[in-house]
Image (cartoon, grey):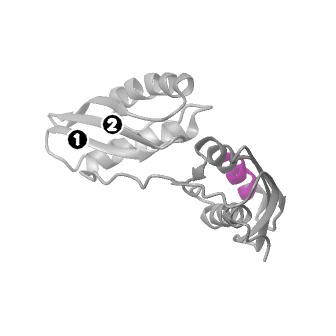
């Protein structure tokens, strides 16, 4: 069940979603969670709202965290992280994603970063002053861990036009990919 470290009351906290922080108000009464209200989020509406509508009643009924909604993993995890923080009395807000600084003109730029298994090389496409594509050209990461991390990070990077949080369980791989993108769009290129 939920670990509730707070007295009865309403507590606000945020968790990292797909599009940025998800802020919730969690109400605790008689030592139980009686309400979870999403106050603010920047998730994709058509994906987030059904996920919230599915997760919140399930969490209230079970008085526990539930499985993520398929197709809305980051949104689900962000919501549950926000609830967990609220119940711990941890109202620290996740860092806002840092926006891309693009120092190159339109074109395709290669960059490299250091991952868990060595170098990660990417080709980054810049068009109309935005990053429109990130393609992993070469890497020596563990395949079963790297691909899901790339599959999660790249769409998030493109959607937010900002550096996003590392994928949990693949921190070094994520950081290597992000470093490679940073180098490509700053014009540093490949080491």
Q: For residue 124, which quarter of the picture?
A: bottom right
The disc placed on residue 24 is: 2
Q: Is residue 153 left or right of residue 38?
A: right
The residue sitting at 68% across, 53% down in the picture is 149
- Identify the residue at image location x=63%, y=67%: 172
Residue 150 in the magenta stretch? The answer is: yes
- Quadrant of the image for the N terminus? top left
Q: Residue 26, percent across and down?
A: 27, 36
- Which residue is drawn at the image coordinates 58% and 44% (left, top)? 160
Q: Earlier in the sequence, mark 2 or mark 1?
A: 1
Q: Residue furthest right?
A: 137
In x, y percent, where is residue 40? 37, 34
For disc 1, the marked residue is: 11
In the image, taking residue 151 as reference, residue 84 lies left or right, namely left
Query: Residue 61's x, y, as percent?
Result: 35, 26
Helix, strand or loop under label 2: strand
Residue 171 visible in the current orientation: yes
- Answer few, some or many: residues within 10 Å of disc 1's Cα (few below 14, many 20 plus, some between 14 and 19): many
Report x, y in % for residue 162: 58, 51
Q: Nearer the viewer, residue 98 or 143?
A: 98
| Magenta residues, start to end | 145-152
């Amino acid at each position: 069940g939920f670990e509730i470290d707070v007295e009865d009351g309403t507590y606000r906290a945020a968790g990292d979603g797909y599009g940025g922080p998800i802020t919730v108000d969690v109400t605790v009464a008689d030592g139980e969670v009686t309400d979870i209200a999403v106050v603010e989020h920047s998730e994709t509406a058509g994906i987030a709202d059904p996920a919230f509508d599915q997760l919140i009643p399930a969490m209230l009924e079970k008085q526990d965290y539930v499985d993520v909604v398929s197709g809305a993993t980051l949104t689900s995890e962000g919501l549950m992280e926000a609830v967990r923080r609220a119940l711990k009395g941890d109202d620290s807000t996740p860092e806002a994603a840092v926006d891309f600084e693009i120092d190159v003109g339109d074109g395709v730029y290669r960059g490299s970063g250091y991952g868990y298994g060595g170098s990660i090389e990417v080709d980054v496409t810049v068009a109309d002053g935005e990053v429109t594509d990130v393609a992993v050209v070469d890497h020596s990461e563990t395949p079963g861990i790297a691909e899901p991390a790339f599959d999660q990070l790249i769409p998030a990077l493109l959607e937010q036009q900002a550096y996003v949080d590392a994928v949990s369980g693949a921190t070094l791989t994520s950081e290597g990919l992000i470093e490679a993108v940073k180098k490509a769009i700053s014009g540093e290129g490949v080491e």
